[in-house]
Amino acid sequence: MMLPSLLILAAISLAPFFYMIWMSFHNMSLLGGAGITSSWNGGANWSRMFTDPAVGQGWLAMLIYFVATVGLELVLGVGVALLVFELVWGRNLALSFILMPMFIAPVIVGLLGRYLVNSSYGLYAWALRQTGVYGGAIFSHPVPAFVSVVLMDVWEWTPLIALITLAGLVSISPQLLEAATVDGARYRQRLRHVILPSLTGVLVIALLVRSMDALRYFSTIWLSTDGGPGNATKIIPLRLYEVAFRFFHLGYAATIGLVMLAVSILLANAFLRVLRAPKAQS
Amino acid sequence: MSNLLDSLRAVGGKRLRNLLVVVVLLWTLIPIAWMVLSSFKNPVDVVSSKPLVTFHPTLANYRLIFSGSNNLWPYIRSSVVAAGVSSLAATALGSLAGYGLARSTWRGRNHVAFWIISTRMAPIAAVILPLFVGFSVLHLINTIWALIIAYLSFNLPFAIWIMEAFFAEMPAGIEEAARVDGALRFQTFRRIALPLVTPGLVTTAILCLVFAWNDYAFAATFTGPGSQTLPVAASQLITETGVNWGELTAIGTIVALPMVVVGLAVRRYLVRGLTFGAISGE
């Protein structure tokens, strides 16, 4: 019963993977349109990659972006879930509204962000100017540009963490919470000693799921700052895309891609290990 | 006395919580509302230096994108076909394979499961390269088939995992009874197992649809005139001479609205779907 799917997956994922390894040892370029030429160049792509400052910069931007987005989403997502969980009235309605950004295409989020922070007619740029927080052109300066691409991602994906956390909150036994309340524990104490410890398993899964997607998507940045200003927001997938489809160095791009793949495989491995651990969650 | 203080604090806490919920809702909804509002603005209002909340609404943007030689219909058709076909194929193949995986006990099962999930986690920027070369060689570039196959590369592993989780939860006893009655394996699957996981099938199909519909990176790389999807149409409104924000927000609304609706329709099963079955949710 698994055969058809496994054959298809082998054709569209396993074969491409081995082909990428082959590509990484070749000098492949794309000649205007369909023509692709390739010649063996040994480990040149690999040695080039390890000394390429642009690639190093891409990974650094990726690391900062990753820590900032996933960190903020985790903290805010748990916060939002706790808020929604305590809602007596309108909980389902509030949750439905809060989940909306998740379903909006990352491209649209990027374009919308670009519109909102435009220095001459953007709503958020206007609000920041009026309140005296920031008056410059947001995408023209590295730090404001970076902050805005981080916030776009936070806007879109915090709901996912909130949703997963809420599922964890719902599954905490009411008796446990009640017992803590009867014992006179304040909200903060209950949070620290009862609620958060019970959420650990769920939060690890939320973190891993989010981390894997954080590596996958790059369209939001692509369509907003396009890696700019300069290379300030050029995370590694954007750099890879540029190497492949702007400079047409497919072999070198494959080398960068293999390292990204290795990172995602490590994350998937961690995810599985958490899943297979003695059922602490769900 | 201390009781009184406590209840006062409780009332204050409740106020604060409600206030925070309002802040979260505003942060979430303002960009969406602004996009929808802007899509009803005329070209002057949409780039007004002072944001306009009251204005004369117009349908001109929608009328424009649906008329003329370069109208939106072909893009909509490509989006519907690419996302729809890949979602249905992934759900059909994925439920078969998911069933097989859930009922299999052979050694190496975990390795296959790991391979499947790591396929889903692979960074899109990396996957694009070998697929691009493969599609070029097979002359699939600029056809809708390229997109359908590319979307299967992430939707099929996703569908297998989720369906596996749904089948694994189903008591095996029911199927054994059918087996004893002499039903073949496929019959047991079709007649007994499949109807019991209808919510799983619907959730899988919808989430696959959302992932494919919202893709930009594959669509921007593999399609040409005739197979371009809605996110590509949106990105094309960004030109050297400026951005037509009225039409762009109109397309944004058209891209976002259906996915928000179908996504929220399966809200009960979202947690399970989006954590690859790791957390069962409500």
Image: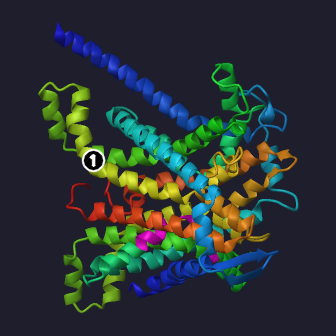
Q: Give x and y (percent) for residue A214.
A: 50, 54
Q: Give the x, y percent position of residue A13.
A: 52, 78
In this view of the protein, which residue sits in the foreground, B209 or A248? A248
Q: Residues within 10 Å of mark 1 (few under 14, many from 20)?
A: some
Q: Is A120 displayed left or right of B230 in the figure?
A: right
* SS for dot 1: helix
Can residue A120 be seen here? The reply is: yes
Residue B62 in magenta stretch: no
Stretch of the chain drawn in magenta: B116-131
The residue pinned by badge 1 equals A200
Residue A101 at what x, y percent from top left? 54, 46
Can you tell which quarter of the image residue B164 is in? Answer: bottom left
Residue at 72%, 60% (x, y): give it: B232
State the quadrant of the C terminus of chain A. bottom left
Q: Main secondary structure of the magenta part?
A: helix
Above or below residue B134? Residue A81 is above
For the point 31% across and 51% down, the residue is A202
